[in-house]
Amino acid sequence: EPEVTQTPSHQVTQMGQEVILRCVPISNHLYFYWYRQILGQKVEFLVSFYNNEISEKSEIFDDQFSVERPDGSNFTLKIRSTKLEDSAMYFCASSGSGEQYFGPGTRLTVT
Amino acid sequence: AQKVTQAQTEISVVEKEDVTLDCVYETRDTTYYLFWYKQPPSGELVFLIRRNSFDEQNEISGRYSWNFQKSTSSFNFTITASQVVDSAVYFCALSEARRRDDKIIFGKGTRLHILP
């Protein structure tokens, strides 16, 4: 069964550093998403992406965040200058005709 | 505005007991989807069910069942004969179906402990 994959599974970075989280969506899917879950809290929508542009973004998705689909297979989330409060689990998801499939997540720890 | 409320923060039951997780939602749309996800200690989100707002039939899948009541905006989840492996955080979620890429709005989750 096709699945969404994410790398790395765990990333530790220092405050102020740039970090790129990578996702490989399911191959025939057209819609891509990033969600965030701070430890012990609910999963929150960050951004959706379709046709090489952002469809919708939340208030969390400020200028420090960007997304890209650089090569037709990967879908990346970049955080330009990480803060302590960016520590969270980041989930990528993709969808074809409605149902979103989630990846296993990348745990980001900012120290 | 969309909102999902899971009033039960944490529930503990003894193995083999039945347990119901409550979910109440708010939306202005007439067409929407409701979901349940399981998040085990390993952290991934495991999809359990998606229900269209036009389909109010209750669903049963093995030990799991879901009760969708549009009149009370509720989508409750029952585990029958619970097992220790059911211990996890369970999230109810909502997506408005206006577009194909509508975001999913999650509730805060209910942490379920099944005691041996």
Image: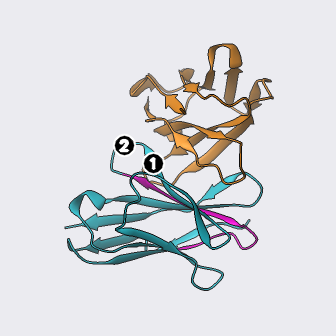
Chain colours: A cyan, B orange
For the residue marked with disc 1, what is the amino acid?
A: Glu
List x then y, in percent, for residue A27: 72, 74
Residue at x-position 24% and y-position 66%: A110
Q: Are marks 2 and 1 in contact (CB under 8 Å)?
A: yes
Residue at x-position 34% and y-position 65%: A108
Residue at x-position 39% and y-position 28%: B9
Kindly identify which chain the residue marked by label 2 belongs to: A
List x then y, in percent, for residue B27: 60, 29
Sort mark 2 into few (<14), some (14-19) or many (20+) by Cα contacts within 10 Å. few
Circle number at residue A9: none
Residue B63 among magenta residues: no
Secondary structure mostly taken by the magenta-highlighted segment of the chain: strand
As drawn, is A27 to the left or to the right of B94? right
Determine which residue is flagged by label 2.
A41
Kindly identify which chain the residue marked by label 1 belongs to: A
Name the element at disc 2: loop
Is B61 rendered above or below residue A64?
Answer: above
Residue B80 in view (yes/no)? no
As drawn, is B51 to the left or to the right of B23? right
As drawn, is A62 to the left or to the right of A48? left
Residue at the top extreme, as displayed: B71
**Image quarter for residue A1?**
bottom right
List x then y, in percent, for residue B16: 55, 24
Is A58 rendered above or below residue B51?
Answer: below
Disc 2 to disc 1, C-alpha distance = 9 Å
For the residue marked with disc 2, what is the amino acid?
A: Gln
Residue at x-position 68% and y-position 13%: B71
List x then y, in percent, for residue B62: 72, 34
Can you tell which of label 2 and label 1 is closer to the viewer?
1
Determine which residue is flagged by label 1.
A44
